[in-house]
Amino acid sequence: MTAATELILASTSRYRRELLARLVRDFRAVAPQIDETPAAGEQPAGLAERLAQAKALAVAERYASACVIGSDQVAELDGRAIGKPGSRDRAIEQLVASSGRRVVFHTAVCVASRRLDGSVQTAIAVDRTDAVFRELTNEEIARYVDRESPLDAAGSFKSEGLGIALFERIETSDPTALVGLPLIALASLLRNAGFVLP
């Protein structure tokens, strides 16, 4: 059991806010303000885990009575991390590279909570989702990017929207992970931290 009296999501992502609202009603979102630069040689799964923990701890330092959720997602193609595209051209480039391929998404979630003695404890889970893309034509890719503008999404698609049409299949144990917050793992972490769910 923790000494937490408040639940905070260490994120400004509207996707994560919408997902967390499925589990709990009373929480607030706070920007974690951390450096998300990968370390030299850092593997995608390790990067997602480290950043999720860093986000949770950064906010937990500022809110002593809170239980803080941090999450991060890193897409991987051929062993290399794929970031958010940020531009139309980069989104098209990412989707061309992913066409007919398997892209692995590592989605980490960390819960940082205060023990009764005031120390911080963290618990982390990392979900792996494999997204297998169809063979996509250049016209399909351009139409998709222009219609949905997935410039803020790792891998250049939004599976909760039209992006679902890009896939041959998705292999996952938690369909919410691909959107950005693995709720099955998070529910377990929150229960362990003393929250009653459902």
Image (cartoon, rainbow, N blue to C red):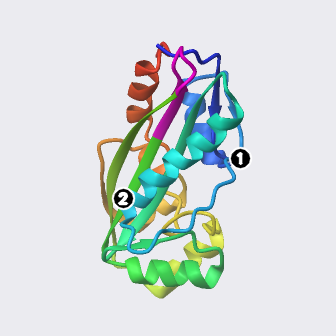
At horizontal 36% and vertical 46% (from top left) the residue drawn is 126
Q: Which residues are magenta?
A: 110-119
Q: Which label belongs to residue 45?
A: 2
- Residue 41: image quadrant is bottom left
Residue 172 belongs to magenta span: no
Residue in the foreground of this view, choosing between 137 and 98: 98
Would you say the residues marked 2 and 1 are in contact, meaning their CB atoms lie under 8 Å apart? Answer: no
| Three-letter code for the amino acid on which mark 2 is drawn | Ala
Question: Dot 2 lies on which element?
Answer: helix
Q: Is residue 78 visible?
A: yes
Residue 114 belongs to magenta span: yes
Residue indicated by mark 1? 31
Residue in the foreground of this view, choosing between 139 and 163: 163
| Three-letter code for the amino acid on which mark 1 is drawn | Ala
Image coordinates of residue 5 in percent, x first then y, are 64, 16
Q: Is residue 30 left or right of residue 174?
A: right
Rendered view: 35 above or below 196: below
Q: Is residue 93 left or right of residue 88?
A: left
Rendered view: 24 above or below 104: above
Q: Is residue 34 left or right of residue 82?
A: right
Image coordinates of residue 58 in percent, x first then y, are 63, 44
Rendered view: 7 above or below 74: above
Q: First in sequence: mark 2 or mark 1?
A: 1
Image coordinates of residue 138 in percent, x first then y, are 48, 87
Q: Is residue 105 visible?
A: no
- Residue 124: image quadrant is top left
